[in-house]
Amino acid sequence: MPALTPEAVHAVLEDAFNRSDLDAYTEAYEPLATLVVPPEGRVVSGRAQIRAATAPVFAGQVRLRSRVLKTVDGGGLALTHARWELTGTDADGTPMTMTGRGTIVSQRRPDGTWGILLDDPMSPEG
């Protein structure tokens, strides 16, 4: 399901996590996008690195809930802030819960959908 609005980018990520669809998750990002990877905060760039960094989470059974708090739409670029919660078990069956506030910069693609340029799911609270 493509993101038709900047806010829908968060719904695409949520759907990908909840269906354990690493391909859909990776495709939500632009080819040269940058992601801050929770919980350690390592920064990765490009779809291949984003996929490799998040694959271990997708190996477990997880559920993501995300709620958009604010959007600043600048036409072809947008900034969104959201609260999220990831729950479930990791790949070895250990229960896990992560929460945070995320900030995403997305851009409108030529086909009218939106793709992620920058994703920091570890944005500061204040």
Image (cartoon, rainbow, N blue to C red):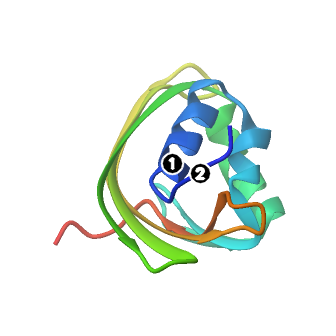
* Residue at image point 56% right, 26% down: 18
Residue behind mark 1: 8
Q: Position of residue 96 (x, y in %)?
A: 42, 30
For label 1, count other residues whose C-alpha is less than 10 Å away and answer few (under 14), some (14-19) or many (20+): some
35 lies above or below 82: below
| Residue 107 vs residue 104, the one in the foreground | 107
| Farthest residue, direction left | 126
| Residue 70 vs residue 41, the one in the foreground | 70
70 relative position to 116: left or right? left
Q: Position of residue 48 (x, y in %)?
A: 83, 61
Residue behind mark 2: 4
Callout in the foreground (2, 1): 2
Three-letter residue code for mark 2: Leu
Label 2 – label 1 distance at C-alpha: 6 Å
60 lies above or below 3: above
60 lies above or below 40: above
* SS for dot 1: helix
Three-letter residue code for mark 1: Ala
Residue 95 in which image quadrant: top left
Q: Position of residue 109 (x, y in %)?
A: 72, 67
Q: Position of residue 68 (x, y in %)?
A: 33, 51
Residue 63 tag number:
none
| Residue 17 vs residue 30, the one in the foreground | 30
Residue 76 in which image quadrant: bottom right
75 lies above or below 71: below
Contact flag, marks 2 and 1 (Cβ < 8 Å): yes
* SS for dot 2: loop
Q: Which quarter of the rendering shows the C terminus?
A: bottom left
